[in-house]
Amino acid sequence: MKKIKVGIVGYGRIAQTHADAWRNTPEVELVAVADSSEEARKKAAEAGLSAYESVEELIAGSQVDAISICTPPSTHLKISLAALERGVSVLCEKPSTVDAAATERLVEAVRKSRAVFQMATKFRHVPEIRTARELIANGDIGDVMHFQIEFAGKADMAQRWNSNPALSGGGVIIDNGSHALDLVEFLFGSPVSVHTHQLSPSNLLNVEDNARLDVATAGGTRGEIVLSWKAQPTSDFYITVHGTQGTIAIGWKASFFSWINAAPVQIGSGYDKNGAHVSMTTAFRDMMWGVSNGWITPEECLVNSASIDASYRSLAMGGRSAVEGFSSAAKAA
């Protein structure tokens, strides 16, 4: 198989995780970085990487086969289009774009390009989450009665781009909520409606820093997503699934499955961020080689964007909002 040359666009916090993952993926060579910051380019050069100001310069100068996009969400569409139009494949940090309308444009570009596109939904590559999906699909916990997903923890976002809506597209909902809503899609099926509640007003940021989402899926499953940059998590488990015959608890340190009135059985040793990213970059390499179909479809990217849109509509109007906002043609892409 051909060795793949990769570049990274945006050399900030999450880019370091992408860089480490690419370096630990066999038959992949990380060769270049693009960033508008002179300081970031200097840091990349010190790491032995060619450094450019723009994605166009990176592609022309390094002739990469693929890029990781690690920039703020407001830039994702423009950078993705620039790469796809040149036949360069894209691994894009979540969310794929800032809204469903922009994601429609992205999906159309993916359909026209010979390159591939995947959103970096790292949690799909966590082994115990894949195990949970199999247990749910096989009916091992019976019918799912309720789920809870919690991504919470104190984080000072005041000096980060995440708190600038012009760059981020929103606050904790578009940030952590993108992962949470993707997990709903992956484990239970497409969300069809959302009722968003802000847990308490933010006095410091221009975006929401906490929210609770009551989510309903196409299959009738209902559950709750709790998101916060200001509160500590309520437990060590970030996903809990209650079924008529048992429970699954996916945790940061360990994960368990138990039937009713039976002792829990451990199904995972905890969240490994670096391991999840290496699994993801390896899967992306295999997709480029044509030996894998990838892990997320264009339709699922659209549903994710539309679910985020619905969450913000609900927050604004104070009621339940349907997941909509993209054409049936785009959804079928």
Image (tube, grey):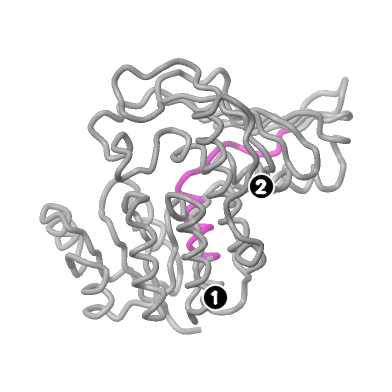
Question: Which amino acid type corresponds to the residue marked 1 in the rendered image?
Answer: Arg
Q: Pick the residue in front: 138 or 204.
A: 204
Locate residue 272, reporting x and y percent: 51, 43
Asked whether the beta carbons under mark 1 and mark 2 sit within 8 Å of each other, the answer is no
Examine the image and state in which quarter residue 220 appears. top right
Q: Residue at x 15, y 59 (%)?
A: 41
Q: Main secondary structure of the magenta part?
A: helix
Residue 271 in magenta stretch: yes
Left or right relative to 172: residue 123:
right
Name the residue rendered at 43%, 67% in the picture. Answer: 90
- What x and y, as percent, mark residue 177? 51, 37
Q: Which mark is residue 331?
A: none
Local SS, label 2:
helix
| Residue at 12% from the left image edge and 52% from the top image edge | 39
Report the front residue among 330 and 233.
Answer: 330
Instruction: Name the residue carrying label 1.
Output: 111
Q: Quadrant of residue 11?
A: bottom left
- Give the spatial CA distance, label 1 vs label 2: 22 Å
Q: Report the amino acid beneath label 2.
A: Glu
Percent across and percent down for residue 287 are 56, 72
Q: In this view, does 144 lie above or below 82?
A: above
Span highlighted in magenta in the image:
266-283
Q: Point out residue 67 in the picture as x, y percentages from the top left corner.
A: 37, 67
The label shown at residue 185 is 2
**Residue drawn at the location 41% of the way across and 17% of the way down:** 201
Relative to 161, is 295 on the left or the right? Answer: right
Circle 1 sits in a helix, a strand or a loop, which is it?
helix
Q: Nearer the viewer, residue 268 or 212?
A: 212
